[in-house]
Image (cartoon, rainbow, N blue to C red):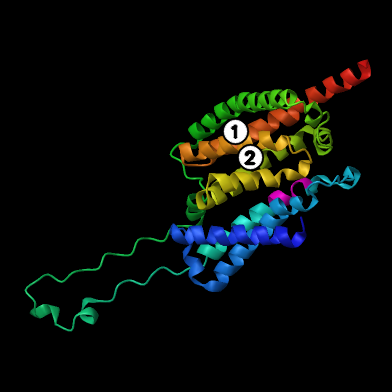
Amino acid sequence: MSGALTAFLAISVAFFMDRMCEGRGLLPPGFREPWRRATAWALVALVLWIGAFASLASFGQKVERDLSQLTTPELFLLHFLLVLTIVCWFLLGFAGIRAAPPPPPLDLLDPVDPILLDEPVPVAAPAPPPVPLLRRFQEQFGFVAPDVPREIGVGVLVGVGSWGAVLAVAILLGLLLMALGQEDALPRQPPALIPWIVALPVGVRILISLSAGVVEETFFRGFLQPRIGIFLSTLLFVLAHFSYGQPLMLVGIGTLSLIYAFLVRWRQNIWPAIAAHALFDAVQLLFIIPAALKYMEKAAAGN
């Protein structure tokens, strides 16, 4: 797939998102100014192209990546771009916007002197106090919750339970492929990037898990999902992980994305999804994958 086509797809999604927001009355007040609106959606299209659609350009091609040249900060580059896009979109939409002026006095609306009327003079209600930017940010991206610790607790339980869902999907997929005589399609080795990450210090792996939980859930579930729906936001989440190079892994990633998506819809905030996502990744990087790699090494040595 060419770079021009992937760029067109990213622009199309950003345009669709703008139309959806306008139709649902979700456009920020700053988007009344065309330059703010155009700049915000251009940034969204750019990050979608870099983070999701660009990987489609190498679809069907075997690309060997030189992991020796990969640095630890590069692992967080996409997360940094996602955060930068969210912040810029929000500031373009809400920062520096003046409140609506109060209604004019009665004598400007009605030339009749109110003193001559045998009625009380209506008094305009005071304008509500401006909402702080931080509060607006929390409202826009799903951080407002009546009890944050309780929501995180719900997320931890779902994060534990999601292991069973992913395992069940993996088993069913494996059985289906074997029934179809496609055992060779089952992956024999994890993507090269996974062992490289697992070899990193424990603190870095914990930081990767926390970053994935907070940043990815804020972008895909807090930002995209309310504006373009569960299906399209899940598809973009899967595409963002397409660079692992194993299409069958995307089934598990899609399963997790749907779990997080419906969790957000159920709880009406993103804290449970953040906790579930971060816990799942941490258990994978700290325990499951290292144990699986050791088992595979012993099995290979035994043969």
Bounds of the magenta span?
Answer: 75-80
What whole-number distance in Å separates the C-alpha atoms at marks 2 and 1?
A: 8 Å
Expressed as whole percent of the image width and height from the top left, the position of residue 15 reads: 57, 62
Categorize mark 1 by other alpha carbons within 10 Å: few (<14), some (14-19), many (20+): many
Q: In this view, does 171 lie above or below 86?
A: above
SS of the residue under disc 2: helix
N-terminal of the pair, mark 2 or mark 1, is: 2
Categorize mark 2 by other alpha carbons within 10 Å: few (<14), some (14-19), many (20+): many
SS of the residue under disc 1: helix
Which residue: 54% across, 33% down?
152
Which residue extends farthest front? Answer: 180
Observer able to see residue 215: no
Q: Please name the residue that numbered disc 1 is placed on.
A: 276
Which residue extends farthest bottom? Answer: 111
Which residue: 26% across, 64% down?
125
Expressed as whole percent of the image width and height from the top left, the position of residue 78 reads: 72, 50
Left or right of residue 152, residue 58 in this image: right
Observer able to see residue 233: yes
Left or right of residue 6, residue 122 in this image: left
Q: Please name the residue that numbered disc 2 is placed on.
A: 213
Query: Picture quarter containing residue 277?
Result: top right
Looking at this view, is 70 or 228 the one in front?
228
Left or right of residue 203, residue 297 in this image: right
Q: Main secondary structure of the magenta part?
A: helix
In the rendered view of the protein, which quadrant contains the N terminus?
A: bottom right
Q: Which amino acid does label 1 sit on?
A: Ala
Asked whether disc 2 touches disc 1, contact meaning CB atoms under 8 Å apart, the reply is yes
